[in-house]
Amino acid sequence: MSESAAAFFYLVSGVLFILALRGLSHPATSRQGNLLGMVGMGIAILTTLFLAGPSFGGLVLIILGIAIGGTIGAVIAKRIAMTAMPQLVAAFHSLVGLAAVMVAAAALYAPESMGIGTVGAIHGEALVEMSIGVAIGAITFTGSVIAFLKLDGRMSGKPIMLPSRHAINLALAVLLVALVIGFAASESHVLFWLVILVSLALGVLLIIPIGGADMPVVVSMLNSYSGWAAAGIGFTLQNLALIITGALVGSSGAILSYIMCKGMNRSFISVILGGFGGDAGPAGGEDMDDRTVKQGSAEDAAYLMVNANKVIIVPGYGMAVAQAQHPLREMADRLKEAGVEVKYAIHPVAGRMPGHMNVLLAEANVPYDDVFELEDINSEFTQSDVAFVIGANDVTNPAARDDKSSPIYGMPILNVDQAQTCLFVKRSLGSGYAGIDNTLFYKDNTMMLLADAKKMVEDIVKALDH
């Protein structure tokens, strides 16, 4: 009876997870989706505790682990800044991968407790599932650690290109397959740990050559890996909740990776094989050539926008760093009061993880109806008086559209240069995360507002009030 009840409640939690993903697909329903996901996870945890049959001692240890982990997670969630959310997500992915490795090791050394056989006589299908799950988990762990270090600035975002890296990765992949086959056939503990070591190395080598400009794809890709690792271990444990949840995370992460690649006009294979991007290159205009830029003040920007009919705001990572979303919404409110039409344009890879800008704008209570994706608003720049770019660099670079020699050529961009006037808020003329000079800075209709984004927007608000 308890097994049937557990399967039923795991199925209920799986349905709630599916509804949660549906809700998270749009900002207007994201809170409801998040709530459904929390309820689903709560049901899965309670089912595991009270219906999946742990002993009293095991129950105490599980509750203790939940208390410790929950406390740490709550503290981190309260302290983390929105700008650090991408690296936090990468760190969480690493923990999922590590958990898969640990669960697989527990299954290997205590198979009786998991109903998959006895030591030396583990079911063959369980060995295959275990080896695949542990390989994906180990790759996810080290890959996510490298992604975290790059996003957090503790490691250079510049691609690290090892000599003959493709040959090395191919050799490791072949070795990994051979080790998995050998382990599944022999149940050798030595081969099991060799699978882990090779997978750990492969995770590092796969992510190190990927540059900063491709990090949004890497984050979603590692999200997918963590899901497949969980699903693999779910099959080993014969746990329906892990299988459903892992498959949902794995498939949705893979779809999101495809969307990110499409948004950058990049193939998934080219990203995995090592892409462009890295440390900021030489600042535009500094020993570059004789190009000049037109600089303006907060008063200039306020005058242009308050006399405009239509203003499109383009937020980027610079807005996130400066925490300028709240004064930005205040500026938009002032413009609306003056009769100006205001919209927000979001590029699919703005920021350093999918949906980064949407979350920041929602935090500032920007109306969902004012926020538009690239394909829905790009045609409107030609009819707008002002494009107000705040910290978005690579996703507005006309070189991606006009310069066939540019490394980012072909990447869809927001056509802010087609507005009558482009106001660009940035600290300096330095290049963006892709390390590429932005030709937008030097166009005749661009006015650079060189300052901290938050201070500049606050000064614009003051000028509008006057």
Image (spheres, grey):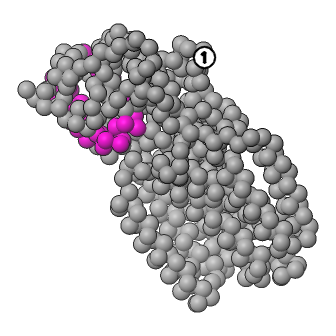
Quadrant in the picture for residue 451: top left
Quadrant in the picture for residue 136: bottom right
Q: Mark 1, residues whose alpha carbon is within 10 Å: few (<14), some, or many (≥20)?
A: few
User: Where's residue 54, x and y in %?
Assistant: 63, 84
Callout 1: helix, strand or loop?
loop
Q: Which residue occupies the foreground of this view, 256 or 147?
A: 147
Residue ID at (59%, 59%):
94
User: Where's residue 36, x and y in %?
Assistant: 47, 57
Queried whether the magenta region covers residue 331, the answer comes back as: yes
Instruction: Name the residue that disc number 1 marks.
Output: 405
Q: Which residue occupies the foreground of this view, 414 or 289?
A: 289
Residue ID at (52%, 32%):
434
Q: Is residue 87 visible?
A: yes
Q: Main secondary structure of the magenta part?
A: helix
Queried whether the magenta region covers residue 315, the answer comes back as: yes
Answer left or right for 381 relative to 201.
Answer: left
Q: Which residue occupies the foreground of this view, 204 or 358?
A: 204
Boundaries of the magenta span: 309-338
Extreme residue in the bottom direction: 56
Answer left or right for 79 relative to 138.
Answer: left
Answer left or right for 93 relative to 455.
Answer: right
User: Where's residue 368, x and y in %?
Assistant: 35, 37
Type of the residue with mark 1:
Ser
User: How many numbered discs, if any?
Assistant: 1
Q: Is residue 248 visible?
A: no
Residue ID at (56%, 34%):
277
User: Where's residue 303, x and y in %?
Assistant: 17, 18
